[in-house]
Amino acid sequence: MKRSNLMAILTDVHLWVPVVVLILGTALLMSLR
Amino acid sequence: MSHSSASASERSTLSLHKLGVFCGLAAAVWLGSAEAPTKLVNTGFSPFVISLGMVMGVFVARWTVPMLLKGTGFLFTDLRDKAHLVVWAVLAGTLWAVANTLTVFAVRNVGLAIAFPLWNTNSLVGLFWGWLLFNELRGSGVKGWLKVFGGAAAIVLGAAILTFATAHQSTNSPDKVAMGILAALGAGVLWGTMYIPYRKAYISGMNPLSFVTIFTFGELGTVFTLGAIFHGGVGNLVGELQRARPMLFWLFLGGFCWVIGDLFQQYAAKYIGIGRGIPLSNTNQLWGLAWGALVFGELSGLSPSGKILVIAGSAVMIAGAVAISMAPPPALELDNWKQAMDRECNRYGLDPQKVTAVVQGNDPLSGQPQKRRWWEVLILCSAVGVFIWLALGTKSQHIAVNTPWMLVLALATIVPLGVCGTLLWRRTRFS
């Protein structure tokens, strides 16, 4: 993958919104164990 | 005239809105019908094992169906052209798996009656992200908003009424109830957020069939990992799976039906967006209810007031679906969709002309004949072999079914597959 594409992915809000939601959801799941 | 343009001129002129609506409704039929085989599974197994069994079936089908429809050559070319989207496909699969596991705890703590309506708000979450990130509903006017948001809200309300009428209430402690509500809401947010990768992939010109082949790795990997964590290790999980061997066929069959429904949902998300497509496919509860009530006699002990609630909930849900079906995006909203598409093209160096064609269902690649590979036969034989092997080891389940209704519903499930599959082929060649 080109470096420019990698930077485009890492600075894309479309990536970080789901990632943050996933982290919070996983934390919630682990607290339910 | 080129081969692809000649092919495009031979295609149906059905509007993409109508096609997306048909796909959303067909998705509901198949996602709802996926519950039928799982009703033949004996109780006494952990929800994680049931979930893993179904996802394993999903994994087999998610590779086989796209390969049969388009061939591995097409899928690899599509994935190579939009390689950056692999990240989002895996992410979406992971979000699905965590949300699905949260629902297990939600049902355990507060019961289905409270949990289901809460996580069913995922369509409203998806609608919000569609509006915020992909310009959906922007420029649709007050009428468009009323129809789409009102329709989506009606579907959530209808689902709440149906679940309240058919499920039992929880008697757990307040602490457990609070955590259960949080888990159900969390599942709704995770599933609603999962639609961000869907929409991103489709406005970038990715084929839904390519997307699901990668999605399934995130899905299976996460379900397996979570199952191992909650069972105290891989060995315990595998042991449970072996114990569940006699009923795995039904879970695989349910997973197969799920994949068909999911594919239609993906096409709905592609052609009418997540704001319209997801609420339509969320009417699957009606079909699950129809199988439960008519074939398995699950509502035979329901009180008259419960029956009235079921009819009312179904009517509200159908009204919501009709409202969304009658809300095609106006020209101004389509301009805003295009801006969202242009953002992806600029950001990731995609060819705007090609992406526009794909988004409109005219993928130039789909007009070209695809060479079939030898390993496709191997994949097909392996998938069929797995199903036959599982079927041979299945113990018969002594559950009473209403055969005439089963035949009617089986027909009502197969007809939308034929009709919608034909429409998709004629209009888009499955692009």
Image (spheres, rainbow, N blue to C red):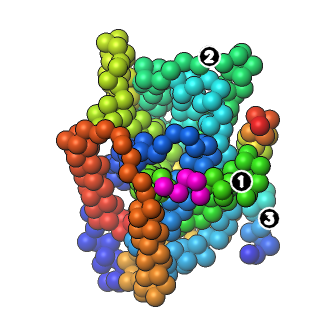
Q: Nearer the viewer, residue B98 or A13?
A: B98
Q: Is residue B399 above or below residue B181?
A: below
Separation (CA) of disc 1 from disc 2: 30 Å
Position of residue B249 in the picture relative to residue B193 (left or right) = left
Q: Quadrant of residue B159?
A: top left
Q: Residues within 10 Å of mark 2 (few under 14, many from 20)?
A: few
The disc labelled 1 sits on which kind of residue?
Asn
Task: Locate the C terminus of chain B and report the quarter of the image it occupies.
Answer: bottom left
Write down the region rendered in magenta: B242-246
Label 1 secondary element: helix
Q: Same chain for the residues at labels 1 and 3, yes or no? A: no
| Residue located beneath label 2 in the image | B171
| Residue located beneath label 1 in the image | B236
Question: Visible in this render: residue B47?
Answer: yes
Q: Nearer the viewer, residue B137 or B316?
A: B316
Residue visible at 55% across and 66% down in the picture:
B213
Residue visible at 38% across and 83% down in the picture:
B369
Residue visible at 41% across and 45% down in the picture:
B40
Q: Same chain for the residues at labels 2 and 3, yes or no? A: no
Chain designation of label 2: B
Q: Residue A7 got which mark?
A: 3
Are the residues tagged 2 and 3 within 8 Å (C-beta)?
A: no
**Residue B287, position as x, y percentages in the image:** 36, 38
Quick check: is B26 in the magenta stretch? no
